[in-house]
Amino acid sequence: MIASTDALLLIAGVDEAGCGPLAGPVCAAAVILDYARPIPGLGDSKQLSAKRRESLELAIQSRSLAWSVAWASAAEIDAINILQASLLAMARAVAALDRRPDRVLVDGNRVPDCGCPVQTIIRGDALISAIGAASILAKVTRDRLMCRLDLDFPGYGFAAHKGYPTAVHRAALRRFGPCPEHRRSFAPVRDSCARSSIASF
């Protein structure tokens, strides 16, 4: 819950989506809610249906004081690791807000460099409405991108599993090898690269 004294501050909730997949970027969102215009049903995006997330996305975008989404690419993930890439995407999301927040509340226990006070909250997406809103925006936005990537790179099933390491995805990796959106620093992708090199030798 937000304390009554915090209602006078601009508080941004921040969360990310896409740490675990083998392909695609990580997406982060930042949301400054208008507490005079509450949005019922905000919470952990993973606990909501896709249809409900999409409905809430529209409400968040129309009723919030400010919102933004930002990315760190698969190449950046490979270059700096998934944790640092997630923090980078979060910092980019906060920087992209058209209002500068007084405080940032982040899901988890790692602090991105946002240029303002940051508080981490374990399970914050379920406890803090602004973080829940960010969780929803990040999840819906990334899922939508993965559906587009499915058209660019058919055969991997990105539209269905969104890049996560399902049996279908792993089988596609063994069959086709990685595409440009795969994270080569992740073990299953790295192993598929090694197998492809051996097969072509």
Image (cartoon, helix red, strand yellow):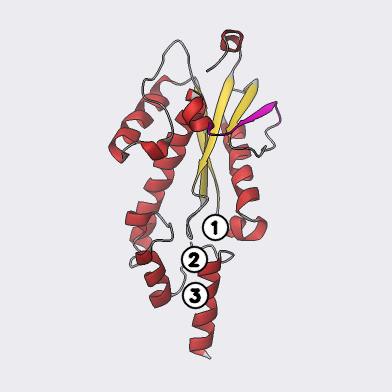
Q: CA distance from mark 3 to mark 2?
A: 13 Å
Lower position in the chain sequence, tag 1 or tag 2: 1
Question: Measured along the vertical axis of the image, is residue 93 above or below residue 7?
Answer: below
Residue designated by label 2: 180
The answer to the question of whether label 1 and label 2 lie on touching residues, with beta carbons closer than 8 A, is yes
Lower position in the chain sequence, tag 3 or tag 1: 1
Q: Is residue 117 magenta?
A: yes
Q: Is residue 98 visible?
A: no
Lower position in the chain sequence, tag 3 or tag 2: 2
Give the image location of residue 175, x and y in percent. Answer: 38, 77
Q: CA distance from mark 1 to mark 2?
A: 8 Å
Bin the neighbour count of mark 1 within 10 Å (Cα to Cα): few under 14, some 14-19, many 20 and up. many
Bin the neighbour count of mark 3 within 10 Å (Cα to Cα): few under 14, some 14-19, many 20 and up. some
- The type of residue carrying mark 3 is Ser
Label 1 secondary element: helix
Q: Residue furthest bottom?
A: 201
Residue designated by label 1: 74
Viewer-nearest residue: 149 or 199? 199
